[in-house]
Amino acid sequence: MERKDVETNLIPLVKRQPSSTAAAGTRTATTLQTLGNIIVSIVGTGILGLPFAFRIAGWLAGALGVAIAGVATFYCMLLLVECKEKIESEEESQETKSYGDLGYKCLGLTGRYLTEALIFLSQCGGAVAYLVFIGQNLSSIYSGHGFSFVTYILLLVPIQIALSWIKSLSSLAPFSIFADICNVLAMCFVLKDDIEQALGGEFSFSDRKAFTSSIGGLPFAGGMAVFCFEGFGMTLSLENSMREKGGFPKLLAKAFAGITFVYVLFGFSGYMAYGDQTKDIITLNLPKNWSAIAVQIGLCLGLIFTFPVMAHPIHEIVEGKLKNSMWFQKLYYNEDGHDDMMTKFGKFGIIFSRAVIVMMLAGLASFVPGFGMFASLVGSTVCALISFVLPASFHLKLMGRSLNIWQRVLDVFILSCGLLFAAYGTYNTMVGV
């Protein structure tokens, strides 16, 4: 999962406000600004693994997997918005709900803990994917220097620990913008190289399979696609920020149509260019010239400085649980227990916890065999549960009696397919395709 799921998902860590005040202060984004936020919250480095997914599944199977994931994610986003509007209509005094609040309303504390746990795991998965991406690209660029993939990841640990001590996300915003620019430039450069490669005379369309013989190809491509559409946790924040509330569904539909088309085009062109030689990160297929190396280094630098943004919700969840525990309050707070009265020992404890989290994420990343397999695994498990299973479950719980038979059947179908996809996708990725 990538940096998109920011702290707005972590309702227990946010002070409650009256809904009228919140709405007045948040609905300021224009249609164009909301469109930009949708794109930024969804499109990330996962797109660079799509050509590999097309290689595993076949170009037609890969395109179908991306299209199905895009349509299903869009529909489930609308379900989440509908659930939020249902709750607001019944409880006018309450603030606008987020994912965690929906979980609590539908399933009580179990729903809240489940939702938060899945968000936590998705953020951890995205952070680990960042480190794997950086490690693979650096080991490719500097392959003759004797450093392994694991070595580059471990070298990043001191830098990431220092950056994790920056508590203000606004201070890291310029680095996020830099990473977005690098992503766009990388995609443009890769597309250009793909076209040149395909037109170079060695391309043969007959060698590119529409469907591979592996039955796990389509679920693998679907898992990668779900990972690429992973900005699901930002749905309610995006809808709440839009000035013209009624126009959000149409705007979201247009954004998803464009993003899905770009994803299919990118995956298709990458596989057409390199065929069975397509690597799990398409930038690893680029020629070893200065421009390709500059793109890879730019991507790595961007992710190094946006890793703290991805890890920020993880720190907030852990620190929120620590601050609510009795033993932490006794050891780390002054007698009045206020946060601004935390002792030096308490502040050191928070800093130490952030360092431990970064080291644990780096340790997990060092055991990941490849970016593509890991991204598909994350997409097939926690991202599938967050994007499909929970929204369908919440919709059935809140709207059940008011739904017609076909709507109920569709919700049950999405719920069942999400669970089966998560189970089979996990098995398929773990055993290899």
Image: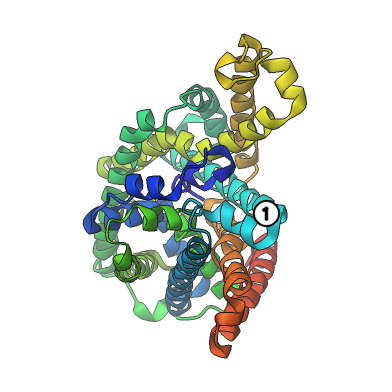
Residue 197 lies in quadrant: bottom left
Residue visible at 56% across and 59% down in the picture: 383
Q: Looking at the picture, does residue 280 appear above or below residue 254?
A: above
Decide which of 409, 101 is in the foreground and name it: 101
In the image, residue 367 lies at what x, y percent?
A: 65, 43
The image position of residue 131, as x and y in percent, is: 52, 40
In this rendering, would 372 be left or right of 187?
A: right
Give 333 or 121, whichever is nearer the viewer: 333
> Where does label 1 land, which residue?
114
**Position of 289 relative to 388 (above/below):** above
Identified by mark 1, the residue type is Leu
Identify the residue shown where x is 61% and y is 15%: 342
Looking at this view, is 230 or 246 the one in front?
246
* Residue under the image location 33 percent in, 56 percent down: 39
Outermost residue on the right side: it is: 327
Tell me: residue 203, above or below residue 156: below
